[in-house]
Image (spheres, helix red, strand yellow):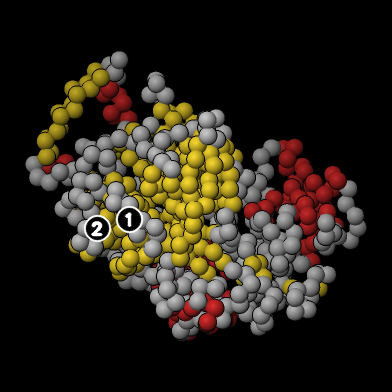
Amino acid sequence: MVAATIVWRFASRPWSLDCGRFVLLVVCWMGVVSDVCQAEPLQEVEPSQAHWRHPFAIALSPDRPLLITANERSKSLTFVDSAEESTLAEYQLPGQPAGLGFLNSNQLAVADVENSCVLLIDVSPVPRIVKRLTCPEPPTGLAVSWDRRSFAVCSQWRRTVSLFRLSQDAIWERTDVSLGETPGAMKFHPSGRSLLVADAFGGKLWIVGLNGKILAQQSIDGHNIRGMAFPSDETLIVTHQILHADAPTTANNIAAAMVIENVTYRFAWTETEDRRIALESTGIREIGVPSHGAADPAGIITLDSGESWVCLAGVDEVARLSLSGETQERLSVGDQPVALVHSIQTGKIVVLNRLSDSLTFIDPELRSISKELSLGETPPLGPQERGERLFFEGQVSRFGWMSCQSCHPHGHSPDLLADTFADDSAGAPKRILSLLGGRDSNPWGWNGAFRSLHDQVQKSSVTTMRGPGFSPRETMDVVSYLHTLPFPPPFRPVVAEADEEVVRRGKDIFESQGCVRCHVPPLTLTSDTVYDVGLTDENGLRKFNPPSLRGVGYRRRLFHDGRAQSLLAVFEEFGHGLTNALTDADQTALIRYLQSL
């Protein structure tokens, strides 16, 4: 047996991790010394160093008022004393975090994007990495079970969820689950027996058992599912948006929530005798009123009183909802609130504001803000930072009903249709295109009307958002931000020599069939003109701008109106772009090549 006794005494504030503030005595034997020496201490960030953090996830210790934020841009963790409402220290991570959660009062799990692993970090007396657990690359989220003996990591682009369970031998055992779509937000059921997973871009929900079996699947009319709460074992609430393709983006339609609805969706959660799960809708509640929209609902929590608090990320507010889901009041907080927690120790709600690098402390009984806490010094805003704020800002639309993020989750696409006047007409909704890697994919718009990305952004601010419109400088700033968005990774990377041969054959077919005329390799796989592809929209438009094929394997619907449900359908049902018929083997090779892009 390995054993150790660790005793420390803080000379001043609790959880202060400055070596000068505590005395540490370690008594160890039977290999503990080597284990401790192999641990990797985290380096403290100089408090006066000005930098952007972009906190996106928050974790609260189960038995003390220690709160930790995961900071995406600075690749760091910030430790906060939630009782004193003050920062303690910031620590550098070896890579970009994708989520975090406490496994016990002293150990934290942090998903590491760049190193494709989960870091187990002991938070005191000095934060240090004590173990690395591998996971599918790249991890994009992490959730911890209520009993803290399980946690889950999702890989959005690999379309998997990995379940880690602590065995009786204190070993973390991993089970990978393929979902077939891109996972996003996750939350464990209070029973600890199952995990709820939401679609990162669309409207699917999965319930996964700890054994890796999918217990239930359900699709809802919506996208941007970003918040989940369990008021009880039998009740589930999710926050999301609903896009109505049949409503053109006129000012009146947007103001009346006829284009985008921001809602909470309630379900009855039932577990059968064989542990299958059934979800039954019990109602949808709109957040917002015609003159006061509620763009981009995100994190949600439910208190013991039954009332819920939800982040309205696009309008920089949180809303208090009644037991039935009706909006009671709204409070202004920091810039882009995305997550919140309720501290049992202090009774306060803590809201995480991603773009203002801050936390807002709310007293739910007084329904008032006690403090907004900056996580540290920040530099002046540059074009990229200003553009990012505009992209996620709901006030650029009519009455704050939607942001650019509403239709382009994380810069990508839900593959839904929208009637945005981008082609200067109404009644012919088009599939929303991804913005990832789109900086060089000129021209823009399905009709190829915009020769510069600046023109497309300016047009969208006026005829899609129907807000005040972007100034020339704001347009430049949004374009500057869009230029930072990379292409998604290949849908199915080449994995073996035999697979490489199939991909090579598919590329030859792609070239011999003349696909390269419209989709010019190797960078953008598009071209700078429009083509008659034998398809016609509702207004008679026949010439379309070919979208880039980078990441085409992730698309759920294809063509301007989404009429093709798969890459197979593109060729088998529509014969798109083919100069002659393909054999089954050639078709398989061509699709495999496209999936590798």
Q: Secondary structure at mark 2?
A: loop
Question: If you read the primary sequence from the N terminus, does the residue marked by circle 2 or circle 1 appear first?
Answer: 1
The residue under label 1 is 307
Q: Nearer the viewer, residue 288 or 102?
A: 288
Q: Position of residue 35 (x, y in %)?
A: 31, 26
Numbered badge on residue 115: none
Q: State left or right for residue 564 relative to residue 482.
A: right
The residue under label 2 is 364
Q: Position of residue 460 (x, y in %)?
A: 55, 78
Q: Secondary structure at mark 1?
A: loop
Q: Residue at x 75, y 79 (%)?
A: 539
User: Label 1 sits on what residue type?
Assistant: Glu
Q: Residues within 10 Å of mark 2 (few under 14, many from 20)?
A: some
Q: Please report contact status of discs 2 and 1: CB closer than 8 Å, yes or no.
A: yes
User: Label 2 sits on what residue type?
Assistant: Pro
Say if residue 347 shows up in the picture: yes
Q: Nearer the viewer, residue 73 or 187?
A: 187
Q: Position of residue 104 (x, y in %)?
A: 30, 35
User: The N terminus appears in which quarter of the rendering?
Assistant: top left
